[in-house]
Amino acid sequence: MAGISKLTSGGLMVNYRCQARCGHCLYCCSPEREADYISYEAARRVFSRVKVLGAPSMHISGGEPFLEPEKLRRVLDAARDEGMPIDYIETSASWATDDEDTRAVLQRVLDYGVTTLSVSISPYHNEYIPLDRVLRLMGLCAEMGLDAPLWIDEFLPDMSVFPTDAVHSRQEYIDFFNRNYWAQLPPRYALYRMGRAVLTHRDDMPTFPTARIPHMGRSCAELAGRSHYHIDCYGGYIPPGCPGLSLPLDALGRELDPEEYPIYTRLAQEPRLLLDYCKSQGFVPGPSYYNRCHLCQEMRLFLYQKFPGRFRELAPASFYESILRERTVETDEEKL
Ligand code: SF4
Ligand code: SF4
């Protein structure tokens, strides 16, 4: 049996576009991602559906929700009109370039009764976002009475060794700390080895031989997950840590039909079943993978490319297109 019968608090991903292109980004967000931002009506549908399934509140995430503050207001209108409390809004602070403008945006958020921003920082972010923006946002939040916890604050001392008004490259971190600095980040970040992280860390994460990847015969508990899920700007339910795997809102709250959702239901039973299916369709596994999720992403990429449009669970298509595009760019750069 597979399906989502009940939900606790989760996140609404209002967009996939972001000013940054962090090397660890699970969802492969970037400035090149589609500009789509969830509409007022679509956000209401999400809030209404998850409420019926038991979610008492949600948080807002992206991409970067503050990329378009007016559209974020529409989402907050939708939450207010559906009676959905917003726990916090996630942001990278990339937009906090000016005191006055930032204050104005924060005041609007406060006017909706939202009192917490979760501010993401890490060396991955610092390749694209100067620390000054984070410090400005934290300072203004403190001044205006908003909570602004840092995720993950243990990186603040590392980031503070560099000038805070500029971005800093991977090489700068390696030169200052040590040559293994970047390779040591995944455990410090509790990184999901998925999405863009697979490209970023392809040379420095340990792998398992394909035949010995753990838990291939064990159900993915994540797929019955009631918490840590996201609903994206297309109304797709994304299980915790499974980017590119999506269920429409109307599939929530009922048992999934294996004919309709052959990928999701196989994975919910045991990922080995999906591997067997992919092999029967011509998939040739590589020699090793970081874990079963890495292999899962590769199998889904294979199915996405081999059967365009066949599997509605493989969504959004732009996730797969982004990985394929970025992989091509990396390969081309390596050839130079
Ligand atoms: S700031 Fe967040 S959403 Fe944007 S690229 Fe980085 S990790 Fe992804
Ligand atoms: S193997 Fe796939 S479905 Fe299972 S938890 Fe990992 S990414 Fe999600």
Image: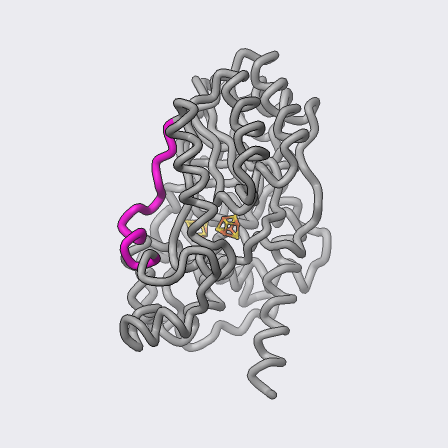
Q: Position of residue 187 (x, y in %)?
A: 28, 58
Residue 44 as seen in the image, left or right of residue 83: right
Image quadrant in which the N terminus is located = top left
Residue that lies at the very extreme toward the bottom in this rendered image: 336
Nearest the eye: 70 or 23? 70
Give above or below for 158 relative to 207.
above
Nearest the eye: 15 or 143? 143
Residue 23 visible: no
When asked about the image quadrant of residue 170, the answer is: bottom left
Nearest the eye: 244 or 154? 154
Q: Position of residue 158 (x, y in %)?
A: 30, 59
Which stretch did the figure color magenta? 147-159
Residue 101 as seen in the image, left or right of residue 22: right
Give above or below for 193 relative to 11.
below
Residue 175 visible: yes
Residue drawn at the location 60% of the way across and 88% of the way down: 336
Residue drawn at the location 44% of the way across and 28% of the way down: 88
Q: What is the number of callouts on the image?
A: 0
Q: Position of residue 100 (x, y in %)?
A: 56, 33
When asked about the image quadrant of residue 206, the answer is: bottom left
Q: Verify whether residue 152 appears in magenta.
A: yes
Q: Verify whether residue 29 appears in magenta.
A: no
